[in-house]
Image (cartoon, rainbow, N blue to C red):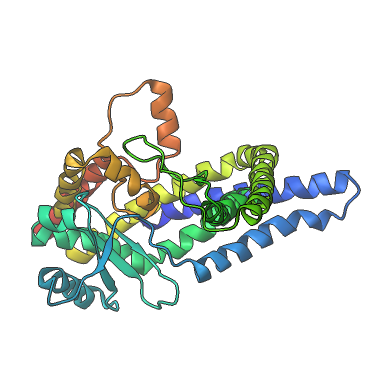
Amino acid sequence: MRTVWPVLGAWLLLAMTTAGYTVLVCVLAWYFGLPWWIGVVPGVVSIVVAEIIIGVSSDPPVKAKLTDAAEEDEPRLHAVVDRLCALSGQEKPILRIMETEAPNSLVYVAKGERRPTLCVSRGLLEQLDNPLLESVLAHEFAHIAHRDARVMVFAEAMAGGVAWLPVSLVPVVEKLDPLLCEAARWCGRPWTPVFEKESEDGQSAPAPERRAPLLIAALLLVLLGTARTVLITLMCVVVLSLGIPAAIVCLPGYVALYRLSRRRELAADRGAAELTGAPARLASALRELEGGMLAVPKKDLRELAHGVPLAILPFQKPDKDEEALLRFIDWIFRSHPRTARRVALLEGDARDMATRARG
């Protein structure tokens, strides 16, 4: 019951927030003389979009290099996973290695794959022994059993689906702008995509050699410049005029979403403790992983930031002392509970198990 009710309460809070959005839009539609049922449309569209995202998403959640974990190359990892499969009765997931020093693990579902993909970092394998590694992977097996990767996509749709449409122009520009810049380089102009990071040495790339006749290149550059200006301007106008207000409106939904995310992490901890029968080992593993983040360069952690919602621990340095307001904001929008709290709960579970065993 300790696992079920907190998660159920978070879901109810999220459902109430979503219902409030729907009622508000219905009232506004009625007030302006439109059919009231228009207010239901955004919620339905959000759920449909969430299903589409699940169906077409294929990119790994982190930018670190991923390699397939063949059994002959990673016999230790396969041995631990095989044992957990036997204990849980679950199908063996696809195993991949994140080539990063950051000690972490995560689960995601790739496009076209029926089985989930379990990613473990090279740093995790190097830092943990077999018992601690088993506890961490048991946490990921609990996420797989709960289908959390899919569940959280729908939860995000419920929380902030209204803000998805205007913000969706950003990835469109991110895809199209490099194509326009490549065409400009063909015309001899060193255009740089707006979302491309600057080089580490701070020097701009040299001007490319023009490969088109001068007249054609001049005409093409005019068309490319116009198209790029319109595209970027449209993105800025839409995001500023619609995206920011939509994000403000969706703020209560995202507060409920992050609460649900934290609850599901605690539920996965509980599931791992029940699967292995050793909650104290998972507590030790969490302390080890958080301490291991200190040795990871901040640049590497930034490249892994997109995987934070799916990881067993956030890709960041351990918490530091902050002002009260910053701590409160951080508490609201944290995707994971604080490690100290997770450790305390797991150690409490270990004491309860020991008491029951003696009794």
Label tally: 0
Q: Where in the figure is residue 352, as x and y percent of width and height? A: 19, 52
Task: Determine the residue positioned at 28% across, 33% down.
Answer: 319
Task: Determine the residue positioned at 61% across, 47% down.
Answer: 17
The residue closer to the viewer here, 298 or 77, is 298
Left or right of 270, for residue 27 = right
Left or right of 122, for residue 50 = right
Left or right of 13, for residue 270 = left
- Against 275, residue 30 (above or below) is above
The residue closer to the viewer here, 291 or 123, is 123
- Against 187, residue 297 (above or below) is above
| Residue 47 visible to an observer of this rendering | yes
Quadrant containing the N terminus is bottom left
The residue closer to the viewer here, 178 or 107, is 178
- Against 310, residue 324 (above or below) is above
| Residue 2 visible to an observer of this rendering | no
Q: Where in the figure is residue 32, as x and y percent of width and height? A: 88, 44
Q: Outermost residue, top direction?
A: 323
Left or right of 112, for residue 95 = left
Task: Determine the residue positioned at 49% across, 45% down.
Answer: 192
The residue closer to the viewer here, 234 or 249, is 234
Quadrant containing the C terminus is bottom left
Q: Where in the figure is residue 269, as x and y percent of width and height? A: 28, 55
Q: Quadrant of residue 107?
A: bottom left
Q: Where in the figure is residue 325, as x and y percent of width and height? A: 43, 23
Task: Determine the residue positioned at 63% across, 50% down.
Answer: 221
